[in-house]
Image (cartoon, rainbow, N blue to C red):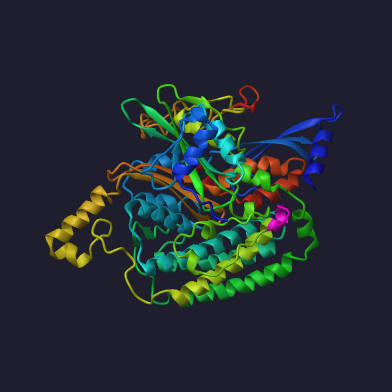
Amino acid sequence: MALELDSADLAARVLAAVPASDARAVESALVPTIEVGSTEMPDVLAFLRDEPGLEFKLFVDATAVDRETPQGLVEVLYIVRSIVDFGWSIVLKTAVDAAEPSMPTCAGVHKGINWAEREIYDMFGVNFDGHPDLRRILMYPEFVGHPLRKSYPYQKRQPLTPERDPLANPWPKRN
Amino acid sequence: MSTEESRKNLAMATDPLSEIMELQMGPSHPACHGTVKFDLRLDGENIISMDTTLGYLHRGFEKMCEQGTWTQVIPYTDRLNYASPNINNFIFCEAVERICGIEAPERATYIRVILSECSRLADHLTCIGMSVTELGAISAGFYMNEARELFYNLNAHVTGARVTVSYGRVGGLLRDVPPDFEQVVRAAIKRTEEVLSDCEKLLERNRIFADRMAGIGILSKEEALSYGLTGPLLRATGVSYDVRKAVPYMFYDRFDFEVPVGTKGDNFDRVNVRWEEMRQSIRIIDQAFKQMPTAGRVLVDDPRYALPEKKDVYENIEGLMNHFKIVIEGVRVPVGEIYFAGEGANGELGFYVVSDGSGRPYRIRVRPPCWYGMAALEDMVRGHMVSDLTAIFGLVNMIGGECDR
C-alpha cells in the first residue's frame, strides 16, 4: 500500500497532533524533510510511530550536522521509515545551540536511538537530557573534545593515555 | 528458546544464592571476527547482561571525508566493508549523483548492479562461512572461502584491486570492464552454485548445526523495527523490507527477483534468508547480463564531472584546464543535502550527504547497517550461553570498518 501524501501534508498532521512543535516541511529539500522544535522531538517521533495509517516504526538513523552559521547551530536529525509503505522515509530536523547543545532524549521512542544519541554526544557534544546511558561510544573515555564539530582541528593530537589498570581505574560502567 | 523462556532464565539468574561472574570477552577474541569487547555478566554459563564496547577500529572516516574532494572520499568508502567494497562505492556515488542531478550511463549502471550483486554473494559467503567456522564446521567455511576468493579475483580482474577497488566515480565508473567480463563472472557463479549446493548438504540437515541455530538469538518483529535492524536480520523476523524493492535505485526495478523472509527471527532464519538471497543475486546477475548494452560510455558525458580524454588533455588547453580543475579543485557538487540508502549486504546502507557548493563535502554520514545490529545484540544473547554469543554475533555480521568507521 502506498502512502498518498507529501511532506507538507505530513507536517500539517504533525502540527495538528503536536501544536507546540512548529512543524513545517522544508520545500527545497531533496528528500521529505520536516523541521520541528527540539523539545517536542520525542512527541513528534512517538506520534509518527503510533498514528494509524502512518506507522513510522522503522527507526533508520539519527545524526547531526555542525552548521557554521553566525548564531552557531548544531542540527540534529532523526530519520524514520513507515512500515505501511517502506518507500516513505522522513527526515526530522531540529536545531540546538552550538555553545551548549542540549535537547530531550528520544531514546524512549525507538530502541536504536540509544546508541545513535550516544554517538551524537560523542562526536558533537549534544547533551540528551534524560538519556539512560550517555557515555562516549566510539572514542575512549579520556578523549577531550567532540571531533566532528567544525571547531575541532582535524590534525589535533591527543596525549597518549597510560595503560589502564582495570581494578584501579575501570572502564565507565553502564548506568 | 523462546523470549519467555529467556526472561525466565533472567529471573533465575537474579536468585540471591547464585553467584554472578563478570567476564570480559575481547577486544581480540579468536571466536569473534571483529575487534569488539563484550563485558558479560554470567550466571554459570548463562548471560544475564552484556555491555558492548566499540570503537577499536575508529579512524575518523567522517572527519577525513570533510578534508578532501568528493572523489577522494571514494577510496575511504572501499575501506568500510572488506567483504563488499563495491556496494559502498556505488551507493556513495549514487547519493552524490542525486544531489548533482545527473545519472550514470546505462551500461555503467548495469555494471554497478552486477558488481554489487557479486559483492553481496561474497559478503554472505563471508558471513555464513566465518560463522560456521567459529561453530566448528570448518570444511564448509573453507569451501565458502574458495567461492569468495573467486569474487575477490573478479574484483582484481575488473578494477585492479581485490578489496580496495575505488571503481565508482561520480557519474559512472573509472573505466569499462575487460572484454571477458561476462565469462569470468559466469564462471565464478557456476562454481559458487556448486559450492552452495555442497555446503547446503553439509549444513542443512546437520544436527549439530541445527541445534546451534534453531531457536537461538530470537528477536521479535517489533524489537527489530525499533532497533533499526534492516537487511537479513530484519527479514528473518518476517518483515519484507528490501531497499531494492521499496525504493528501487540503479535498475533494480527492471529485474525479477524475490525478497526471502523468515518466520521466527532466530539464527536459523538469518542463515536461510542469506542463503536464498544468494540465489536471488545470481538471478539478478543473469538478467542484468541479458539486458546490458554491449557497448557505450561508462562515465557521464559532462565536463563538470568527467575527466576529459587523455588525448584532449595533452593536445588542447581546454582539456588540460578541465583536467586540472577536476583533479585539484574537485567535482563541484551543488548546494544540497540528501539521505540516500541502498541495500548493502548487511542491510540498509545509507549516506547522509551535505554539500555547501565548494569542492569538498561539508558532512558525510554513513549509516552502517551492522551498527544497529550490534545495538540489538544484548537483547538477542540475554539468557543464552556464552557459546551462543559466538553464533549470534557471527550472524549479525559486524564489520569493524563499517561499524566503527
Q: Residue at x 55, y 36 (%)?
A: A45
Q: Is residue B359 visible?
A: yes
Q: Residue at x 36, y 35 (%)?
A: A154
Q: Residue B131 appears at what percent x and percent y? A: 66, 55
Q: Residue at x 59, y 63 (%)?
A: B145
- Residue A145 vs residue A164: left or right? left
**Location of residue B337 (image quadrant):** top left
Q: Main secondary structure of the magenta part?
A: loop
Find out whether residue B45 is within the magenta segment: no
- Residue B48 vs residue A79: left or right? right
- Residue B349 vs residue B211: left or right? left
Q: Residue B317 appears at what percent x and percent y? A: 12, 59
Q: Residue B332 appears at what percent x and percent y? A: 27, 49
Find out whether residue B265 is within the magenta segment: yes
Q: Which residues are magenta?
A: B262-269
Return the residue nearer the eye: B103 or B186: B103
Q: Is residue A137 visible?
A: no
- Find the residue positioned furthest to the right: B17
Return the residue nearer the eye: A19 or B383: A19
Return the residue nearer the eye: B336 or B186: B336
Q: Residue A15 appears at what percent x and percent y? A: 49, 34
